[in-house]
Image: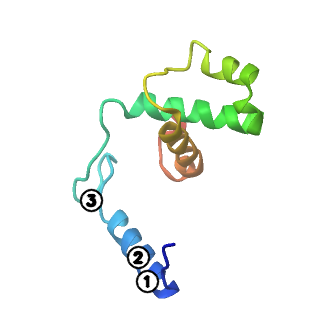
Amino acid sequence: MFRCSPILAGLSFVAFMLAASMVNHGLVNSTLPVGPGLTLDESFNIDQGVYLADAFAQHGPLLFTPDVAREVFGAPRYLPDHPPLGRFVLGVSHSLTSAFIAGSEET
C-alpha cells in the first residue's frame, strides 16, 4: 500500500495549486503565460461529460442497470466513441467550476 506523510501531501497540493494558477488554460485576454489551451475535441467531450454527470445525478447507481443504461447510452445525443469515465470526470469538473469561469455557462 502506498503511504504518504501529511506534510508531503500538503506540499504536493500546494505545488500543484501554484503551478495550475500560473498557466493560462485557454482564457482570452489573460495576463498569464500561454498554457495548453483547448483542443478540437474538448467542446464535445465536455458536453458529453455534462450529459453523463446529469444522467448519473438523475439515476444514481441505477444508471448501470440494463434498462437505464440502454436509455442513457443508447440515446442519439450520446457519442460512444470514447470510454465514458474520462468524460464523466470532465462533466463533474465542469459542473463544479463553471461558476468561476466567465462564459462557461454557455457550454
Q: Amino acid at mark 1?
A: Leu
Q: Which mark is residue 12?
A: 2
Give the residue pinned by disc 1. Answer: 8
Residue 15: quadrant of the picture:
bottom left
Residue 17, placed above or below residue 53: below
Q: Residues within 10 Å of mark 3 (few under 14, many from 20)?
A: few
- What's under tag 3, amino acid-wise? Thr
Judge by depth and name the residue closer to the eye, 79 or 104.
Answer: 79
* Residue 23 percent coordinates (x, y): 29, 60
* Residue at 48 percent of width and 73 percent of height: 2
Give whichever of discs 2 and 3 has the lower sequence position.
Answer: 2
Where does the image place residue 9, in percent across and percent down from the top left?
47, 79
Label pair 2/1, CB-CB below 8 angstroms:
yes
Q: How many marks?
A: 3
Label 1 neighbour load within 10 Å: few <14, some 14-19, many 20+: few
Left or right relative to 60: residue 106: left
| Residues packed near mark 2 inside 10 Å, few (<14), some (14 to 19) or many (20 plus) | few
Q: Quadrant of residue 82?
A: top left
Left or right: 72 in relation to 19: right
Cα gap from disc 3 to disc 1, whole angstroms: 31 Å
Q: Is residue 45 visible?
A: yes
The way the protein has been coloured in the rendering is: rainbow
Label disc, if present, on residue 57 of the rendered structure = none
- The residue where tag 3 is placed is 31
Mark 3 in CB contact with mark 1 (< 8 angstroms): no
Question: What element does badge 2 sit on?
Answer: helix
* Left or right of 89 on screen, residue 39: left
Q: Residue furthest left?
A: 33
